[in-house]
Amino acid sequence: MPDRLSALDASFLYLEGSTTPMHVGGVAVFRRPKAGFDYDKLVDLIEQRLSLVPRYRQKVVHVPGRIARPVWVDDPDFDVTYHVRRSALPKPGNETQLHDLIARLMSRPLDHSRPLWEIYLVEGLEQNQTAVITKTHQAMIDGIASLEIGQVMLDVSPTPRTNVENLWMPQPEPSSLQLVADAVTDIVHSPGELVENVRSAALDTVNTVEKVFNAFGVLASAVRTAATPAPGSPLNVRITSPQRRFAVARAQLDDLRAIRKQHGGTVNDVVLAALSGALRNWLLSRGENVTGSTTIRAMAPLSVREADPDSGNNVSAYLVDLPVGEPNPVVRLHHVSHAMRAHQESGQSVAADALVKVSGFAPPTLHALGARAASSFSRRLFNVIVTNVPGPQVPLYAAGARMTEIFPVVPLAKNQALAIGVTSYDGGVYFGLNGDRDAMSDVDVLATMVEESVEELMGTASA
């Protein structure tokens, strides 16, 4: 019997609209080794590692009449060169040109008739660099034991690990009759599924997704405990186009740790405080009315590494009001630390531990899981999503090329103009800002303000 999508995974197919593509992305920058790092090497690497991610050779097939959720089936026409693509910037390609390319690529929806992923090798970058851009649909990332293509292509050594490449033979695609027969069998065993599937087929996506999240207990507590709606903000506007803008900011992990050591709290608190300062200056630059009580509510799904290295990653999400009205950076940090500590101590955080247990290097997977939590409640509960995922503090390689930076690209939810992803890696902290092209024409200005806000906090740590 084909592997049926879970209700949660299927919901992200139903949620996808013309203005809200539901893929999560990542941008990794590599330093080209003397041996080179070209398209053929990337294709060979992906082909060798595909056996570790069998879902990447499967496509989604809908059941006739949508009497049951779609199923995963092997794509008999799978062609790795369709999914692994190449692009180039006019030499020497600068960072602004790369960001424009990222924005254009992320604006395009994935082809639902094929496996739901793409990888782009971008050549022509200045300083002998190459970029790899990944796009993976959220329906592919189940949050329990899933691996993402960006994970399996990386090694801890310049010498790639040896993989036993298994001969792949696609299973025959089920006929329409078989799909219906399997669906009927499932309905007999779970009659409540029929009502849910009819509702989904009618595109009642909000009710569907809320029901799914409530069933998992992931967002129900947040809905109950959010006493007030999110404040009005230019970050919540009607999105009329899939077109995006992308910008990045950088910081040093040791600097954030120094700030934490001086003022208390956690590195996550420092990140949120730095974003608070940046958003404050951004609002002021737009001529928005900012008073002492002005806040921006962030949904912050945070990855927390347990002391036990075998325990994997746990994701907990919090609704936190960022104190953008406070002019003092240290007071902003204390406000954020207090709010996060209160969440943790009260147990009112969004409990995702039961949903997510992902081991290994998994920033793209965990950013996708954070984006899932934002998909149906952004207008009512929060203004911006901030996913913060710690990565390894050792260098990683792909086909011998050393990865120097990695930036997440978190998708926008409905009526959400900005999504911020943060990843730490090898001593650096990397912010990826994905914004609606019309509403966030100044996303690059906000990115610069993030770096300035970190510097402002650093000034208080060294004083």
Image (cartoon, rainbow, N blue to C red):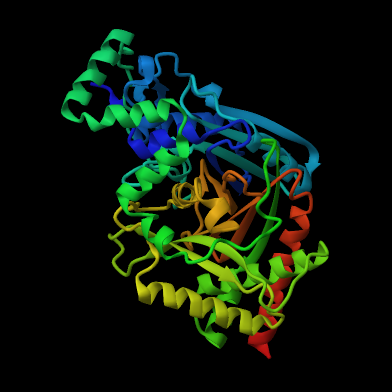
Residue 200 location (% of width, % of height): 41, 30
Q: Residue at x 72, y 43 (%)?
A: 98
Is residue 116 in sight in this rendering?
A: yes
On the image, which quarter does residue 57 sit in?
top left
Q: Residue at x 53, y 44 (%)?
A: 400
Q: Residue at x 38, y 68 (%)?
A: 348
On the image, which quarter does residue 310 sit in?
bottom left
Report the front residue among 291 and 28.
291
On the image, which quarter does residue 290 sit in?
bottom right
Q: Quadrant of the C terminus?
A: bottom right
Q: Is residue 194 left or right of residue 95?
A: left
Q: Is residue 297 left or right of residue 226?
A: right
Residue 156 location (% of width, % of height): 44, 52
Q: Quadrant of the N terminus?
A: top left
Q: Residue furthest bottom?
A: 463
Q: Is residue 56 left or right of residue 104?
A: left
Residue 336 location (% of width, % of height): 55, 76
Above or below, 128 against 176 in this view is below
Residue 110 location (% of width, % of height): 55, 28
Is residue 425 in sight in this rendering?
A: no
Above or below, 33 against 457 in this view is above
Above or below, 207 against 348 in this view is above
Q: Residue furthest left?
A: 189
Q: Residue at x 69, y 83 (%)?
A: 328
